Amino acid sequence: MGTSPSTVRPSAGTGRPAAPPGGRPLSTTAVLVIACAAQFMVVLDVSIVNVALPAMRADLHLTPAGQQWIVNAYTLGFAGLLLLGGRIADLVGPRRAFLTGLGVFTLASLVGGLADGAGPLIAARAAQGVGGAVLAPATLTLIMTTFTEPRARTRAMGAWSAVMAAGGAAGAVVGGLLTEYAGWRWVLFVNVPVGIALFLAALAYVPGGTVGRGGLRRMDLPGAVTVTAGLTALVYGIISTESHGWGSPAVWGPLAASGLLLAAFTLIESKVAHPLVPLRILRRRTLVTANVVTMLAGAAMFAMWFVLSLYFQQVLGYSAVRAGLAFVAGSVAIIAGSQIATRTIARTGPRPLLVAGTLTSTVGFLWLSRFAADGSYPVDVLGPFVLCTLGMGLSMMPATVTATSGVPREEAGLASGLANTFRQVGGAVGLAVLATVASHTTATRLAEGGVSAAQALTDGFGRALLVGAAFTTCALVGALTLPARQAPARAAEATGS
């Protein structure tokens, strides 16, 4: 996607396009391709392991909770440090943040592929999440600072959002193919050559950008530690309900610790000179509402990939590659929804698209929850699955636009970090909740007797998808409370002025 030279931010005091030291002249097309490719890789790894989980379980002897942690270790490392990652991009410049995050992500992928047990694999997945938390905000900050003209920025944001949506959907397809034909370790090894290629391309084409005054000395490490520990304790407490009652210390202990840690985070942010999240930014009602909508929708959508992957393989008996290919329709629907949103947002504003997207997904979840143990993909899954993912595509870019509109340039990384944090926190909590609901329902049905294992599993998955529908319904209510239709000019500028 090309843009005119006027869309390129000049170097300070020169009036010429910025370029990395010793690198080539800045190409906006190259920057966009590099940023989108890196974002695709980061989001891909949220879902790429889902189809590989049965193979990992057999090879490493994982428990059901261990399977969840293979997914959640990445999501929590990602979500918990995204705010810090956003501030890193603001304070040291997006190029340095991009290269650092990409290096950590690529190295952790190599270590994870070599893991010989559940513990090392979970640790490597957490390290991947840390790298992704620095890398992902840098990709959005690069776009926001490279494309300064509203129309060019709208197109660039549309491409970035479509790639992000497709990455989540394509993870299951890529994971299935790699697991079937190369082994589950390649769902991690695949990032290594891609990461190296992107690192070299970024050295050549990504501009140095502006470094914030004070650099890393302004980092709010106490805030980063408390928010990450608080989110981890929250998800751990929810997952613990799989093997303990709600009254058990193993459940309420982590949940109470989570409340205390998040309260401490709020207190820290109100006291420190350079907070990770300046509390004044949370006074923006539109920003907070859009991020809550994103969190609720993410809670349903992330968990849906996990649930459907298990339904395909454990109930319908699909191979890993067949299960992965079953997600292709969802990938296409997400891309289609993202393109519709990109082409219409300047005329409609974000709110109608968010409402349409969350409503469409809610209908899809309600329909999908009715699938049967002896069902088939064309009859029971395809139609509602396309509705769920089409709604996801329609709502993702408008939610990001709403959450980042009107934010000063020096806080662009923070705004993008907040948007991504809410999405990933929703995904982690949603997966914990829906997986726990499915597990409890299945165990209860088996204890009652009179049903097959396949039917008990299906009942559990169906109940989990109903909870997903409740999440998207709440997201719909939140979308309805956002400001009404914007004028076309404002909608175009909302991509980050």
Image (cartoon, grey):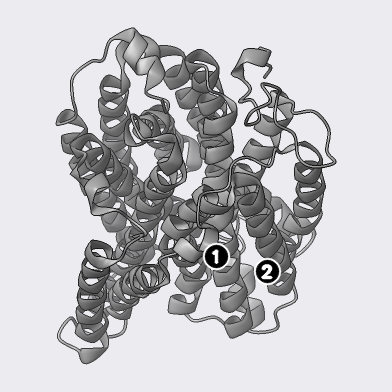
Q: Position of residue 87 (x, y in %)?
A: 46, 54
Do callouts 1 and 2 mark residues in contact (Cβ within 8 Å)?
Answer: yes
Instruction: Tell me the SS state at disc 2.
Output: helix
Give the number of callouts: 2
Q: Position of residue 482 (x, y in %)?
A: 19, 29
Q: Residue at 51% across / 28% down in the picture?
A: 157
Q: Residue at 52% across / 52% down in the picture?
A: 91
In this rendering, the answer to whether 32 lies above or below 425 is above
**Which of the two residues, 374 or 428, is positioned nearer the viewer here?**
428
Instruction: Tell me the SS state at disc 1.
Output: helix
Say whether residue 374 is visible.
no
Q: Quadrant of residue 457?
A: bottom left
Q: Alpha carbon of mark 1 to alpha carbon of mark 2: how far? A: 9 Å
> What label does residue 108 carry, if any?
2
**Which of the two residues, 232 or 301, is positioned nearer the viewer here?**
232
Q: Position of residue 434 (x, y in %)?
A: 32, 61
> What label does residue 130 carry, if any?
1
- Determine whether, in the image, residue 274 is placed left or right of residue 311: left
Residue depth check, mark 1 versus mark 2: number of the one nearer the observer: 1
In this rendering, the answer to whether 412 lies above or below 351 is below
Q: Residue at 55% across / 65% down in the picture?
A: 130
| Crowd around label 1: few <14 · some 14–19 · many ≥20 (10 Å) | many
Where's the N terminus, which quadrant?
Answer: top right
Q: Spot the residue most to the front.
A: 13
Say whether residue 201 is visible.
yes
- The amino acid on which the numbered mark 2 sits, given as a three-letter code, is Ala
